[in-house]
Image: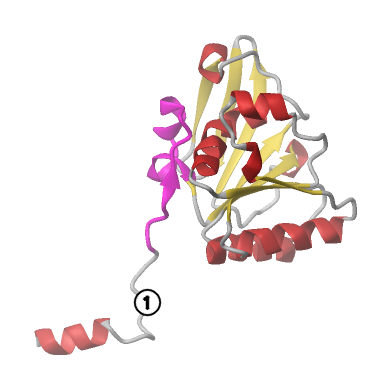
Amino acid sequence: MNSALDTLRQHPALWGGQKERETLSTAFPALDDLLPGGGWPLGALTEILLPREGVGELRLIMPALARLSREGRWLAWVAPPHLPYAPALAAWEVRLSRVLLVQAPVASDRLWAAEQALRSGACGAVLTWLQECEDRALRRLQLAAERGSCWGILFRPLRFADRPSPAALRLQMGAEPGGLAVQILKGRGGRVKLRSEELGVKSESA
C-alpha cells in the first residue's frame, strides 16, 4: 500500500499544493510580523500603491535592496520618475555597481524591459513604475518573477487599489505625522505605522 502511495505521489500530473514562498526580511520587525512568511515575497510581485510620489516608498524597501546588492544580485530600476540619487543609495549601503537603470518612456517598452529583467534570473529585484496596465500584462510580470525567482516591485497610484491584481502582496502607503503608515491590502492583512526613527529619516523618498 505504501509503495503504491509513494508511486502516486511521484507522478508528474499530481499537484501537491503550493510551496511556501521564500521571503526576505524588510528589516522592520513590526512589518515582518504582518507579512506572510515574515518578509518580502521572492519570486513574486509586490505592488505598492501610493497617494503621491515621495511618501517614503523607497525607504521602506531600501534595507532589502541593500542586502540583495551585497549578495551580488542586480537591482533593475525600470523607468523611475526621478534618477536614483547615488549618495542616498550609498548611505543605505546599496552597492552602486549592482544598480541597473533602464530608461523606457513608452509603456510597452517599460513592460517588456521589466518582464525580461524579472525572468532573467540575474536580478534580485526589479523596480517598475506603472500607470494604466492590462491585467494580462500584470500576470505576465507575476509569471516572469516566479520564473526568475525575483522580487518584483510595482509602484502604482492609489486609484488602482480597487482593481484586481495578480501580485502576491499589495500595500497601501501614506505619510503620517512622525512616520509612515503601511496597510496590507492583499496578504495576511493588517496595518502598521513605522516611526521616522525606524526609517532613518523623515518620510521622504530616497
Q: Residue 36 magenta-drawn?
A: yes
User: Considering only vertical position in the picture, is 181 above or below 1?
Assistant: above
- Quarter holding the N terminus is bottom left
Determine whether the residue tagged by mark 1 lies in a helix, strand or loop: loop
Q: Can the viewer see residue 7?
A: yes
**Would you place residue 161 above or below residue 165 in this image?**
above
View extreme (right): residue: 106
> Extreme top residue here?
178
User: Above or below — where is 32 with respect to 133?
Assistant: above
Q: Quadrant of residue 120?
A: bottom right
Specify whether 191 is left or right of 152: left
Q: Inspect this view and state whether residue 56 appears.
A: no
Nearer to the camera, 3 or 78: 78
Q: Which one is nearer the viewer's eye here, 87 or 112?
A: 87
- Residue 85 % position (x, y): 75, 29
Amino acid type at image mark 1: Trp
Q: Which of the image's four quarters has the C terminus?
A: top right
Which residues fall within the magenta stretch?
19-40
Q: Position of residue 106 (x, y in %)?
A: 90, 55
Between residue 96 and residue 109, name the one nearer to us.
96
The residue where tag 1 is placed is 15
Relative to 142, is 138 on the left or the right? Answer: right
- Which residue is rendered at x = 25% and y = 86% of the image? 8
Residue 48 image offset from top left, x and y in percent: 65, 40
Residue 68 among those drawn in magenta? no
Compared across the picture, whether 127 is left or right of 109 comes to: left
Residue 82 screen position, x and y as percent: 82, 34
